[in-house]
Image (cartoon, rainbow, N blue to C red):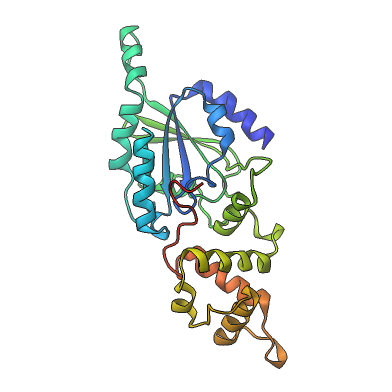
Amino acid sequence: MTKTMRQMKEDLKLIDLVIEIADARIPVSGRNPELGNLCGNKARIVIFGKADLADERETARWQEEFRKKGQKTIFCDFRKNSIRKQLLPLIQEATREKAERDRKRGMKPRNVRAMVCGIPNVGKSTFINSFAGTAAAKTGNRPGVTKGRQWIHMGGGVELLDTAGVLWPKFEDQKTGLALALVGSMPDDIIDRGELVVDLIRVLKKRYPGILNARYGCDEGREMEAEIMADIAARRGALKKGAEPDYEKVSRLILDDFRSGRIGRITLETAGES
């Protein structure tokens, strides 16, 4: 993180605008608080991708929340929606003052240079490819695909500097770490997947009662989350010898279903929630 943030600080001298990519399912936890301090007074646009996986009602509430705060935001699905028409006017608006200052100084107009940043696995490369209309950046459904920095000419008077995803060293609370782990912004190999799914079931029972029953036909009324996992394992054939639940297998199944949206459209954070 230290190396990446140091490089970003140097790169900020070269750019006009910061485009932060975040996950629509975790509008707060999915944003690196260090970026605010790093970016200072640079113009900034926040784009929440994976909106097709997020709860539409919660997304509407978050859009209103950010609008009230005067923050420039877009919620979209990079794979299906072209971001270009939505973003170019915002870029022009965000950099208008600088362009006007340059004009008064007699400087010739030049391309807007924007830095694309965010935490791992939020879809930065997918966003760039959607904006460019071609495979300009490597993509992958795991954190760490973008290893370094690269300038990409987008046309329309815009150049993007792609940067590696980076987390911050210490989370303020366990909810933040849980949210990041659930959406895949932390490597799965450093997480106990079984414990993570226990937490996921607990969250879903509270925020979306009935959604697990609708997906798996399981009994959500069971007191222990592990009992619900065992019920799902039996119904989906995730069993070991002797018909014992295979908790590793069923944990992987439930987590994959959540991340892909097969359980349903879910947002883990509510606008205005303390």
Would you place residue 41 above or below residue 52 in this image? Answer: above
Image coordinates of residue 153 in percent, x first then y, are 41, 34
Q: Quadrant of residue 233?
A: bottom right
Work out whether residue 65 can be spotted.
Answer: yes
Label tally: 0
Q: Residue at x 34, y 35 (%)?
A: 155
**Quadrant including the N terminus:** top right
Front-lying residue, 84 or 230: 230
Residue at the top extreme? 105
Residue 199 spot, x, y in % from top left: 61, 64
Which residue is outermost to the bottom? 242
Q: Is residue 95 left or right of residue 242?
A: left
The residue depicted at 43 percent of the width and 48 percent of the height is: 271
Look at the picture and state if 57 lies above or below 39: below
Q: Is residue 79 visible in the rendered structure shown here?
A: no
Horizontally, residue 227 falls left or right of residue 140, namely right
| Residue 83, position as x, y percentages in the image | 33, 45
**Residue 190 higher or lower than 170, as above or below:** below
Q: What residue is at 43 percent from the left and 24 percent from the top?
A: 16
Q: Residue at 44% of width from left, 46% of height from top? A: 272
Residue 23 in picture, x, y percent from top left = 47, 50
